[in-house]
Image: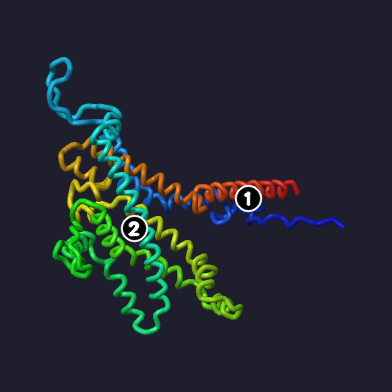
């Protein structure tokens, strides 16, 4: 007894029926590229072009005076990587490394605190029985306040005769140089952006079915075990997105310490503040160099974050591409065998 192969679907003329766009990976890929083309064009205009322009500007420096041959030099002159090398020399290098440390320290500290407080907020908003809408609205109010307004408000709170010193019964000069300035910025940033983390985590909590918790309670699992074994693993995707977004945003911190503490404050000066100061003094080349270095720092942190957490987007794309090629090869082989039979 031999197995028979069903003939391929044919059109009225007897020719094999062409696969549809949904079945053909090539046509499916072309359709996806066509639909994504407008998005890629917008990204190229608002991201790629400014980045290329910043890299180009970082290779130039405004020079006024005489060159070694005694000729008058005016305007922007090509200096190669001089703006980058000057960044690590002398007093400029000390300011750069101080700003780099401040940026990293503020990012790590604020993101950790925001994740802990944000998860707690999400749990409160998710389990609140009475006044659930009021609780959610009140928690999300700080996130809706513009950063500049929030900075001015906290500046009043941390004044020498402000609310903070009244509550602590002390006379700490929060808005001057010192570690207390970092503490003030951290408190203000966590107060403002922890609700953002809570909002994303709350979205993840909404999709967890109650049957899972009921089964855990039947098995005798305590509330703490339910949190570690059920809630945290299931809410992990939303939590990782929140951490990534907040981390990348914190690395670009500028307006909160700039308005709240002030410019050229060694305790809270960040890389974005260095770039802004160079640009405000018409030193476009060094400012562009700072911006490029900050961009590279953010890109490296984002890539490391994605790789360490196992969300290998490029790897998944390669796997899908390989599977599509295998399906195409199998379809071609099937079609060829059908034509021979």
| C-alpha span from label 1 to label 2 | 47 Å
Residue contact at pointers 1 and 2, CB within 8 angstroms: no
Which quadrant does the N terminus fall into? bottom right
In screen coordinates, is 96 left or right of 217? left
**Place of residue 214 in the rendered image (x, y in percent of width and height, measured from the top left):** 55, 79
Q: Mark 1 against mark 2, which lies toward the viewer? A: 2
Q: Which residue carries the number 1 mark?
A: 327
The answer to whether residue 259 shows anywhere in this view is no
How many C-alpha atoms fall within 10 Å of the one at disc 1: few (<14), some, or many (≥20)?
A: some
The structure residue drawn at horizontal position 72% and vertical position 50%, both measured from the top left corner, is: 338
Res. 74 mark: none
Quadrant position of residue 240: bottom left
Q: Which residue carries the number 2 mark?
A: 110
In the orientation shown, which residue stands out farthest toward the front?
A: 170
Q: Earlier in the sequence, mark 1 or mark 2?
A: 2
Secondary structure state at the residue bearing disc 2: helix
Quadrant position of residue 96: top left
How many C-alpha atoms fall within 10 Å of the one at disc 2: few (<14), some, or many (≥20)?
A: many
Quadrant position of residue 119: bottom left
**Place of residue 75 in the rendered image (x, y in percent of width and height, measured from the top left):** 16, 29
Number of callouts: 2
In screen coordinates, is 54 left or right of 17? left
Pick the residue in front: 167 or 184. Answer: 167
Residue 193 in the image: above or below residue 217: above
**Place of residue 91 in the rendered image (x, y in percent of width and height, measured from the top left):** 23, 35
Pick the residue in front: 109 or 213. Answer: 109
The structure residue drawn at horizontal position 31% and vertical position 38%, both measured from the top left corner, is: 52
Secondary structure state at the residue bearing disc 1: helix
In the orientation shown, which residue stands out farthest toward the right?
A: 1
The answer to whether residue 21 shows anywhere in this view is yes
The structure residue drawn at horizontal position 24% and vertical position 36%, both measured from the top left corner, is: 92
**Place of residue 312 in the rendered image (x, y in percent of width and height, measured from the top left):** 51, 50
């Amino acid at each position: 007894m031999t197995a028979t192969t069903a003939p391929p679907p044919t059109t009225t003329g007897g020719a094999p029926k062409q696969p549809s766009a949904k079945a053909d990976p090539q046509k499916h890929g072309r359709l996806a590229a066509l639909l994504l083309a407008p998005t890629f064009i917008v990204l190229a205009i608002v991201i790629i072009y400014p980045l290329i322009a910043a890299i180009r500007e970082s290779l130039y420096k405004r020079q006024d005076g005489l060159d070694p041959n005694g000729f008058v030099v005016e305007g922007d002159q090509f200096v190669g990587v001089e703006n980058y090398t000057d960044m690590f020399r002398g007093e400029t290098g000390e300011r750069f490394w101080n700003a780099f440390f401040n940026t990293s320290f503020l990012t790590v500290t604020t993101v950790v605190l925001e994740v802990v407080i944000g998860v707690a907020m999400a749990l409160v908003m998710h389990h609140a029985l009475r006044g659930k809408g009021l609780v959610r609205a009140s928690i999300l109010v700080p996130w809706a306040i513009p950063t500049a307004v929030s900075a001015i408000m906290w500046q009043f709170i941390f004044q020498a005769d402000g609310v903070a010193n009244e509550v602590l019964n002390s006379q700490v000069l929060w808005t001057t140089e010192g570690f207390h300035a970092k503490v003030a910025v951290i408190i203000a940033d966590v107060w403002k952006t922890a609700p953002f983390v809570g909002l994303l985590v709350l979205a993840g909590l909404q999709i967890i079915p109650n049957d899972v918790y009921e089964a855990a309670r039947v098995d005798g699992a305590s509330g703490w075990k339910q949190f570690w074994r059920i809630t945290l693993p299931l809410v992990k995707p939303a939590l990782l997105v929140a951490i990534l977004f907040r981390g990348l945003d914190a690395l670009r911190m500028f307006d909160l310490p700039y308005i709240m503490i002030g410019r050229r404050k060694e305790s809270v000066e960040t890389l974005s503040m260095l770039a802004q100061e160079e640009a405000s003094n018409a030193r476009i080349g060094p400012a562009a160099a700072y911006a490029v270095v900050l961009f590279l720092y953010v890109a490296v942190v984002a890539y490391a974050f994605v790789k360490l957490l196992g969300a290998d987007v490029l790897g998944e794309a390669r796997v899908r591409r390989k599977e599509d090629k295998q399906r195409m090869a199998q379809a071609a082989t099937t079609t060829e065998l059908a034509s021979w039979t």
